[in-house]
Each structure stands twice: as C-alpha cells, then as structure tokens.
Image (spheres, rainbow, N blue to C red):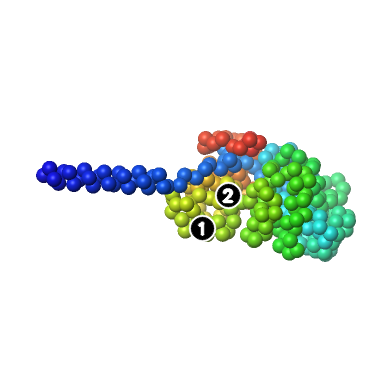
Amino acid sequence: MARSRWRVIVGLASILVACAETAEEAVTCPPSPWRSSPPLVIAHAGGEGLGPANTLVAMERSLAAGADLLDVDLRMTRDGVVVATHDRDVATTTDGAGNVDELTWAELRRLDASAGWTGPPIGGPVRIPSLEQVLTRFPTVRISLELKQVEPPMTGPLCDVLRRTTSVGRVYASANEDRVVYAARDACPGLLITTTYADLDTMRSSTEGDADWCAASPIGQPPYGEGRLDAERVAMSHRRGTALFVWTVDDADVLRELATAGVDAVYTRRPDIARAVFDDVGVVVDVLPADGVSGG
C-alpha cells in the first residue's frame, strides 16, 4: 500500500513538472496596442456615405461626425503620384475616362470626383486628392491605407510620401495581394501592415500556446458576415494579440451587435451612425488603447 501510494505521489509529481514545463514553454501573446472599447470608427473610403468616396469633402465631414480614423484607397498616376481613389477606371467615379495609371496627375486632378454623387449638394466640383494632400490636410489623424494597385508597383512613391510627411507612424497598410503589402513593409521601415492571408493560414493550423499562435500583426481585418464574430471569437483574437477591425457595416443594429461583442474598430460608410451607436453602447471590455487611439 505504501509502495502504491509512493507511485501515485511520484506520478503526480511527474505530471506537475510536465505541466509546469508546458506552461513555461507556452507562448503568451503581447496585447495589441490597437484594442479599443467602444470600437474605433473608421470612415470607409473617407466616409463615402457622407461625401464622394476618397475625397477631402467626405473626410472632413466624417471627422466632424466623429470618425476616429480615415480609410483611403490608393493608386498611382502615370507620372508617379499616389492618389486616393478606388477604381482603376476613372469613369466609375468621375466625369472623365481612362485608367488612373495611364493618366498624369495634371490630367487626373482636372476631373470632377463628385460626378456620381447622389447625396446632398457639394457646391462645386470635387477633385481626387493625392495621398500627400490627405496627409497634410489631416496631420494628426490615423489613416488606413488600402493599396489597390498591383502593377506598376507604387511602393517607392508611397514610401517617399510617408517619409516626406513623417507619417509612417500614424498609418497602417493592407492589400488584397500579400506581395503588395509585404513590399510596402520592406520598403518603408516601421510601416505597420495588417494580418495577411499567409498569416491567417499559419494561424489556422496552430494550437493555442504554440509559437505560431500569436498574430503576426496587431490588427486583423475580418469582413462582417464571413464566419462568426461573437464575443468568444473576439476574445480568442485578443488572446492572440490582435485587435479586430471589421468591415464594412452601416446598419445600426449590426454596429451595436459588434460593439457588444467587443470588436475594436469598424469600417463604415456612415461614421455619424456608428459614432451615435458606439457612444450609446459605451465601454464593453476593459482595454487601454494606444496613445492617440480611443473609441470616443
């Protein structure tokens, strides 16, 4: 009996040692500095529900309505000027014709970017802004850069603008193709990029506590409606060290649902609606956002 008891004690001790070693080896992910409650309001395409997409008019209205960050789509002209516009074909959003990368900056800036606008009157033509104009007009605002152009690459001119305006530390970049955003990160030291598709593949195959469990970026950007976005998934993402920035939502009920679930930011065409909802919901989870980033 004594021998059996001793075997049990030795066995338990072995298990405890193994557990301790596992605990020591388990990876604890550093918290994302982009956590926020209530969520940050990100004006999608500058706030295209309040003004023509990616224009200074929309951005100014969005910030006045309570947006915390601006989101801009980027392409490059034939002569190397990085501009804020979504589509390659300018006919979709302006009174002109042709492709952005086949037009010069002088040609592009003559076009009226409010040609397709159906909202309240703007009071005159609206121009496509350059990225430099956006950054200098809003020198303290954090900005999401969506890199739309693949070829020809715009990495060099993009980095030049960010350095010239000392903006690398207040922007982050994403793209539909990993190689585009990786090239931007490599060319612009200090440029933050969001979680890529390759990162997601690695994370999906990992187990909590593994070396690959932690997110490669402090910002993840899932689209609303793709998979489950409840409090449990949000909490798991936070344990991985990533803040969840969800896109693109304008409905007040869905915005409230996401805020209650604890997401950290939402891209929206209607910053005015999102601001009202998030202010009403208030703080849901106890987080300390990074300096200069807050949800209200």
Quadrant housing residue 109: bottom right
Could you tell me if residue 85 is visible in this image?
A: no
Left or right: residue 129 versus residue 203 is right
Please state the horizontal and vertical placement of residue 144, each as a whole percent of the image: 68, 48
Q: Which quarter of the figure is the C terminus placed in?
A: top right
Other residues around mark 2 within 10 Å, as few (<14) / some (14–19) / many (≥20)? some
Could you tell me if residue 22 is visible in this image?
A: yes
Q: Nearer the viewer, residue 74 or 182?
A: 182
Q: CA distance from mark 1 to mark 2?
A: 12 Å
Label 2 amino acid?
A: Ser
Q: Nearer the viewer, residue 102 or 91?
A: 102
Q: Residue furthest left?
A: 1
Under circle 2, the secondary element is loop
Please state the horizontal and vertical placement of residue 32, each as a whole percent of the image: 56, 43
Please state the horizontal and vertical placement of residue 11, each as a whole percent of the image: 23, 47
- Mark sitting earlier along the chain (1/2): 1
Left or right: residue 209 versus residue 218 is left
What residue sits right under mark 2 in the picture? 217
